[in-house]
Amino acid sequence: MAPRLTVQVQLVLQALLRDPARELYGLELSEETGLQPGTAYPILLRLEHEGWVTSRWEDIDPRAEKRPARRYYRLTAGGAVQASAALAAARRPKGTALRRLAERGGST
Amino acid sequence: MMPRTGPRRDRAEKQGIAWLAGAGMWIAVGVAVAVPPGLAGWARVTFACCMGLTALSFIAVYRGRSRRTGNGLSVHGRDDDDGPAGPAVHQRHTLRMVSLLMPRPAGRRWLAEAESLLAEVTAARRGAAVRSYLLSAPRLAVMMWTREVLRRARHGPRRPG
């Protein structure tokens, strides 16, 4: 089942789709989307649950790096395709009401 | 593992001894003053322990309050005080407590990710980031528990290891 494409979900997907092979961690994603990290996290979790996104812990020695390990996210191959399609569909004007209005306008 | 040594440990030991002494004193007072004379032996001991524990909990609450408010009236001198805990410590405690609302693995991951991000975010943005984590936590907890319950219904409880 595809996740509900709210504006926030679209922002996250757009950020991930800019370079589907690139991995982004929470702070980067938050900066790119303008979303608060607490907002982006549940979205990423949902996308991961749907299989659109995969994640991994960074493999570092926190003492040597003097910071905790990051969690990196990136789109899966299937996720990238589905995300592109979903975003394209979301950009199209939402149908019936607009179409009816256009048809009515054309008929008069 | 290195044993814990130094002034912190000394202070903890001294505090422990002081607490034990306090508990003993209150139990003794309870036995001597408040135990009705008609009670059987075991009932006297139980009654005295209850009195002691009640008194101890009152003291603990009072001491906790006086330390939090930092009014300088604590029985410990200023040299014995670590000083007020920074906002980062409070935030970490709050996040940890909130993570306990979620199923354990999900809570741990949420906390680890939040801490990882908060370690790198600028101080100016940290407060807003923490607030956003805390605000989204209840909904996230519901989502995680729903998922966990469904998973358990399908596969049974998670096995350790």
Image (cartoon, rainbow, N blue to C red):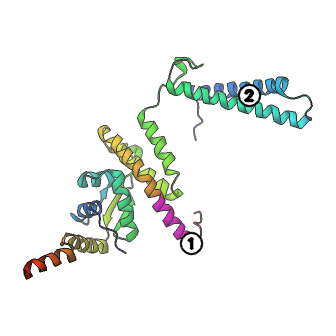
Give the image quarter of residue B119: top left
**Tag 2: Cα neighbours inside 10 Å, few (<14), some, or many (≥20)?**
some
Question: In the displayed structure, does residue A37 sit left or right of residue A19?
Answer: right
**Which quadrant is the N terminus of chain A positioned in?**
bottom left
Residue B23 in sight: yes
Give the image quarter of residue B153: bottom right
Question: In the displayed structure, does residue A95 sit left or right of residue A68?
Answer: left
Q: Residue at x 51, y 56 (%)?
A: B102
Q: Is residue A37 magenta?
A: no
Chain label for disc 2: B
Q: What stretch of residues is rendered in magenta?
A: B142-156
Q: Position of residue B126 (x, y in %)?
A: 34, 41
Could you tell which of marks 1 and 2 lies nearer the N-terminus?
A: 2
Q: Position of residue A19 (x, y in %)?
A: 22, 64
Please give the residue where the numbered disc 2 appears in the rendered image. B23
Q: What secondary structure do most residues of the magenta stretch adopt?
A: helix
Q: Is residue B147 magenta?
A: yes
Residue B6 in sight: no
Q: Residue at x 31, y 64 (%)?
A: A74
The mark found on residue B37 in the picture is none
Please give the residue where the numbered disc 1 appears in the rendered image. B153
**Tag 1: Cα neighbours inside 10 Å, few (<14), some, or many (≥20)?**
few
